Amino acid sequence: MAKMDPAERFSPDAVRKADGGEKKPANVKLGKIAQQVAAQYRRDTMSPVMVAGVLRLVEFAILFISGMTIFAYYVGFSTPLYWHYPLIIAGVSLATVVGLEFFDCYQVPALMRPSRYVGRMALVWAGAFAVVATTGFLFKISEDFSRLLFGLWFVAGLGLLVVVRMIMARMIRRWARNGRMERRAVIVGGGKAAEGLIRSIEQQPYNDIRICGIFDDRDDKRSPPIVAGYPKLGNIAELIEFARIARIDMLIVSLPLTAESRVLSLLKKLWVLPVDIRLSAHNNQLQFRPRSYSFIGSVPLLDIFDKPINDWDSVAKRAFDIVFSIIGIIVFSPVMLATAIAIKLDSKGPVIFKQKRHGFNNEEVEVFKFRSMYAEQSDPTAKKTVTKNDPRVTRVGRFIRKTSIDELPQFFNALFGSLSLVGPRPHAVAAQSHNLLYTEVVDGYFARHRVKPGVTGWAQINGWRGEMDTDEKIKMRTEYDLFYIENWSLWLDLKILVLTPVRLLNTENAY
């Protein structure tokens, strides 16, 4: 059978256009068991990807430091080759880490059972030395270097690698037992298909998947309340609420690929969540291109959606936020001080205005702004949109809103972590258009919250800032926000940050 590509059948665009997407029901309440399970998984876990990444850095550092220690003791920095040795030691250390990666020595099975991978580790370590020795022989410079140094480093380095791996294995097994390092998954869809999938996952050796429960829209007659020992915790609407509370990493849709309309209908509801979404290919007769699959052990899954800005990307973005937030606070501190004085002189009330807005994963966050309205007329819920010549806005408020100076305190939000510097702009929890909540205007609106909201964003520098007085403006802002999420990079963040002051010169929509 010809291999197929699910990218077209289950692409983000196909999911958005699919029939069956429903607006979020009001006041969805989890059942008692679902609430208990969700509360059990509120705490974040350590990602295996992050743990392996840190281990790479640790092993490089250990190998390099041990080599430099032996060099300093047996050779010293007085040698004419004082810079050659550190360069070679760094090169061998880096080559070893790369080689260990190539031989899968940073995968979960290797980390949990290092004794079975000692041979590979020794082979990689010896190979790095062999490359150095061969290079020295070919260039006829091997006699200039200390054989004793490299001999001692070879033994010491290998011993240190083994010791580190043994210690790490004990730590990982302990983390796995207490739930600190695992990938949490929810099965979507019940019955025999879900039971077969769960059994297959549980049979995988060195499995880091913890199944948290099952959600299915079908009643108990068509979908049993307990499957393979796991309870059915609710329907799909309740799953969305469950994933807002519990820290879930993955949703696995256990439905046959032939039920395309039902699969698309489910994905239409689920894609707003900041999780990996996979479609079970267990016992599937269709063949897809290899790049379409990911695996839990040997269990194949089709990759539909990936959690945006995850693992090391999130670390890079957080570092970006901290560095540029501090720079922003320092650069704009005179402006913020002058603004605070002007607000205090212009009207009574606090200088800072705090407002509840939707943050990451639809959680509420408190956003800081300079107060631009009369204190007694402030609208923390933003039920009434600020319009042109709004009498609630003070004289100073009109200026700072038009120039976006009122947003400068949000540098502190970004520094403390409730906002990012760049991302979809957070809206107030009760923001409305024509007496309709934004969620009622735009289908899939909450997909904006798959990443942390930002002080500025792609929509803002493209002209979609200020008053959202029409449904079309809300829809366009959401489209630009979704484009940003799907195309994120640090370069895009930097571009948006640089362009923001330039684009703010256009004050047409800012009141």
Image: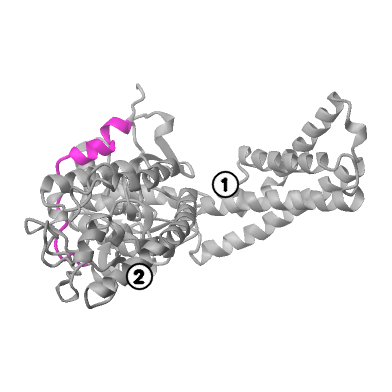
Three-letter residue code for mark 2: Ala
Q: Position of residue 12 (x, y in %)?
A: 27, 39
Q: Are marks 1 and 2 in contact (CB under 8 Å)?
A: no
- Residue at 26% x, 50% y: name it: 447
Q: Residue furthest top?
A: 2
| Residue 311 magenta-highlighted | no
Gap between marks 1 and 2 measured at Cα: 30 Å
The residue tagged 1 is 107
Where is residue 210, by image quadrant? Answer: bottom left
| Residue 15 magenta-highlighted | yes
| Range of residues picked out in magenta | 6-29
Left or right, 126 with reference to 151: left
- Mark yes or no: residue 46 visible: yes
- Mark yes or no: residue 417 visible: no
Whichever of callouts 1 and 2 sits on the residue coming sooner in the sequence is: 2
- Graded by Cα atoms within 10 Å as few (under 14), some (14 to 19) or many (20 or more), the crowding at tag 2 reads some
Q: Nearer the viewer, residue 209 or 367?
A: 367
Asked if 3 appears above or below 501 in the picture, the reply is above
- Residue at 89% x, 32% y: name it: 142
Left or right, 177 with reference to 386: right
Q: Quadrant of the C terminus?
A: bottom left
- Residue at 67% x, 43% y: name it: 97
Q: Quadrant of the N terminus?
A: top left
- Residue at 22% x, 78% y: name it: 348
The residue tagged 2 is 39
Three-letter residue code for mark 1: Gln
Where is residue 472, by image quadrant? Answer: top left
Q: Tag 1's secondary structure? A: loop
